[in-house]
Image (cartoon, helix red, strand yellow):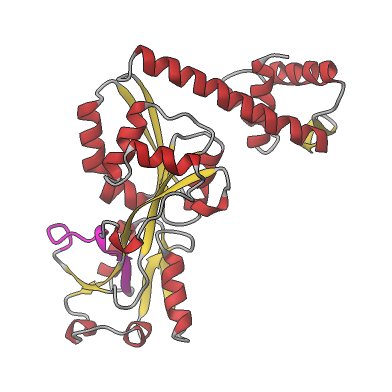
Amino acid sequence: MKLLQLRYIWEISKNNFNISATAEKLSTSQPGISKHVRQLEDELGVEIFERKGKQLIQATPTGAELIKYAGSILSDVTNIKNIALDYQDTSRGSLVLATTHTQARYVLPSIIKKFISLYPHIKLNIRQGTPSQIAKMAANREVDIAIATEAMELFENLVMLPCYRWNRSIIFPKSHPLNNEKRLTLDQIAEHPIVTYDFGFTGRSALDRAFATSELEPNIALTAVDTDVIKTYVRLGLGVGIIASLAYGDKNDSDLVARDASHLFDYSITKIGFCRSVNLRKYTYDFIEMFATHLDRNTVDTYVQNHGNALKIDYESLPTF
């Protein structure tokens, strides 16, 4: 049994049992992967995957158990390497982040600038996706850190640390009728077409919940995953926008009016997550603390060791954007 064989069955399971996609991801050949999988099955005397012709369909019940342990072994190997690397040089390595457009565009730039100035030799990579994609990448250890508001609770093997809370603003051109209202209500907003985030993005669940609680049916005219796209269509007069307040800037958005909507919607909590079984590098701890200053190394370790039970956080005391 070889680590390479365990890597192959683990990656196959994470690529929808598609050997071609797995080979492309690992920069190797499809026949080579198939050969190693067969050799492992012969050695263990069990079939790890169900097949239809040459295609893999799914893991067998025994194979699913083996893949689970393979993932654990590979995680331990990564941890051993990380410990050794930190001993050799804490200033070199790589950090892969997965996050949404809103975080990448409006929250992370200053933090990343600070991080790079402290760790100029760390290779930093940012991947964008939907919240569910982001959480899945972290759970599968494809990225080191996931930052999102939605969907982080979908994977039990993720550590999820609350970073800050935020709310929304209603945006519209200065000529819009709502500009004559002093304090907006949900009823007033529901009278107009709405441009906001796609379902599953950037606290959208809190928005939908507020309208449902008030028994209102919002006219969602257009949705997008990108705040800048929402602003563009608001400028075109397609509707009023509902965006994260942190995504509005007086300098760049001076042609739009932004009204605070924190009295209309519940606050949302942005969280930072990583796979529970992974041993974090020193610079990863530092990045987490840069992103959320209350999450120092001791707090993070306490949270991981106690599965969150020992970390009592007053959500109202979190930084607010």
Q: Which residue is drawn at 44% across and 34% down?
A: 144
Residue 282, given in percent of the width and then of the height, sits at 35, 27
Rendered-image quadrant of the N terminus: top right
Residue 161, given in percent of the width and then of the height, sits at 41, 48
Q: Residue at x 57, y 43 (%)?
A: 157
Q: Determine whether 294 is above or below 301 in the image.
A: below
Q: How many numbered marks, from 0 up?
A: 0
Q: Residue furthest front?
A: 310
Q: Is residue 304 visible?
A: yes
Q: Which residue is drawn at 19% across and 81% down?
A: 179
Q: Residue furthest top?
A: 88
> Which one is nearer the viewer's eye here, 308 or 167?
308
In magenta, the rendered stretch is 240-253
- Judge whether residue 133 is colored magenta: no
Residue 229, given in percent of the width and then of the height, sits at 33, 59
From the viewer's perspective, tell me whether residue 211 is left or right of residue 286: right
From the viewer's perspective, tell me whether residue 129 is left or right of residue 266: right
Q: In which quarter of the image is residue 298?
A: top left
> Which one is nearer the viewer's eye here, 216 or 198?
216
> Which one is nearer the viewer's eye here, 230 or 199?
199
> Which one is nearer the viewer's eye here, 166 or 90?
90
Rendered-image quadrant of the C terminus: bottom left
Q: In which quarter of the image is residue 31?
A: top right
Residue 318, given in percent of the width and then of the height, sits at 30, 57
- Judge whether residue 245 is colored magenta: yes
Q: Residue at x 47, y 35 (%)?
A: 143
From the viewer's perspective, tell me whether residue 14 is left or right of residue 293: right
Q: Determine whether 8 is above or below 147 in the image.
A: above
Q: Can residue 20 be seen in this view?
A: no
